[in-house]
Amino acid sequence: MTPSILILGGTGKVGSRLARQLSASQQPILVASRRGTGNGHGVPVAFDWHNRETWEKPFATAASPIGAVYLIAPPSLDADKIMNEFIDFARERGVRRFVLQSASSIEPGGPAMGKVHSYLIELGQRGEVDWAVLRPTWFQENFADQPNHYRSIKEEGKVYSATGDGKIPWVSSDDIAAVAARALTSPEPPNTEYLVLGPELLSYGEIADILTDVLGKKIVHVDLSAEGLEERHQSFGMAAEYAKMMSAMDTAIKFGAENRTNDVVLAVTGDRPKTFREFAESAKETWL
Ligand SMILES: NC(=O)c1ccc[n+]([C@@H]2O[C@H](COP(=O)([O-])OP(=O)(O)OC[C@H]3O[C@@H](n4cnc5c(N)ncnc54)[C@H](OP(=O)(O)O)[C@@H]3O)[C@@H](O)[C@H]2O)c1
């Protein structure tokens, strides 16, 4: 019996693509999210990080024992405590492999997922789990999936950031999911981290230029102050502390924090990573 893979955050940008890719290779999967609607692949299950009564559900629902879990954090700064608690909960139920989706900007031991990253390293060193941590940079799909971006592109012809001319190696969620699928299913445990970056460095201004080309309508970049961006995030319903952290990330980008590329996607998947223009062409309808 092939063990099941549990995808937490399975309806989000990466989770839904991971579910599709694993299903295509006949892998039994459970797709978890608060709403529990699933995404048309595998078995849907309602799971809320903040409600421990839901944690047992995937284990009670799985058709075969859960062997691996893909961990996507809830958007709160103290997520590490509940995530590490859930890792122990899942280990007690026989899970051996954990693959964490962290972020390029978060070092092991750093805030939120950084502490989950260091916990997995610690458990791995004791031989108690197999693990991998994906540290993707900013997703291309943010512009199509997040209202703060798709609404301003569609309704105002604008993209907002506080990054100045700072550049980012924007990565496709398809490529992140492809790296995740291999980390979850490789016969040899990865026991390492992957810095998952896209193929080219682009500022928000250059993103606006590509969108202008693809849409045939002028899109401009509005460079906000850090405080201005924080307020904007809150106006879209983001918690104050989280908005502050997101805004600080833009400031870091302004000063070059994301200014690098690598060949991790090609090395792990055998496929070249998608460009932003390819993504924009495929998502064009969203902004018209
Ligand atoms: N977006 C980026 O550019 C980027 C870059 C690097 C790293 N990351 C990291 O990637 C992670 C996911 O971000 P994203 O933008 O990809 O998010 P997303 O597409 O919005 O996906 C989030 C997923 O988590 C689920 N979820 C949210 N709150 C939950 C809760 N309390 N309990 C259970 N499930 C919950 C959502 O479904 P329901 O709403 O149905 O629960 C959804 O399936 C975050 O940790 C983020 O820091 C993002």
Image: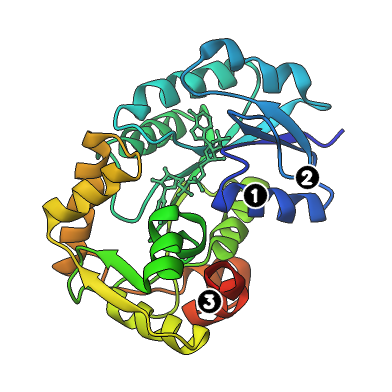
Residue type at mark 2: give it. His
Near-viewer residue (267 or 73):
73
User: What distance separates the C-alpha of mark 2 from that of mark 1?
Assistant: 8 Å
**Against 177, is 58 above or below?**
above
Helix, strand or loop under label 3: helix
Query: Mark 1 sits on what residue?
Result: 16
Residues packed near mark 2 inside 10 Å, few (<14), some (14 to 19) or many (20 plus): many
User: What distance separates the C-alpha of mark 3 from that of mark 1?
Assistant: 19 Å
Residues packed near mark 3 inside 10 Å, few (<14), some (14 to 19) or many (20 plus): many
Asked whether, in this view, residue 159 is left or right of residue 71, the answer is: left
Residues packed near mark 1 inside 10 Å, few (<14), some (14 to 19) or many (20 plus): many
Helix, strand or loop under label 2: loop
Q: Position of residue 71 (x, y in %)?
A: 52, 37
Near-viewer residue (80 or 172):
172
Sequence order check, earlier mark of 2 and 3 = 2
Query: Mark 3 sits on what residue?
Result: 280
Does label 2 point to a residue whose CB lies under 8 Å from ligand 1? no
Asked if residue 89 can be seen in this view, the reply is yes
Does label 1 point to a residue whose CB lies under 8 Å from ligand 1? yes
Query: Mark 2 sits on what residue?
Result: 41
Tell me what residue is drawn at x 52 percent, y 13 percent: 52
Tell me what residue is drawn at x 27 percent, y 75 percent: 221
Sequence order check, earlier mark of 3 and 1 = 1
User: Pointers 2 and 1 in contact (CB under 8 A)?
Assistant: yes
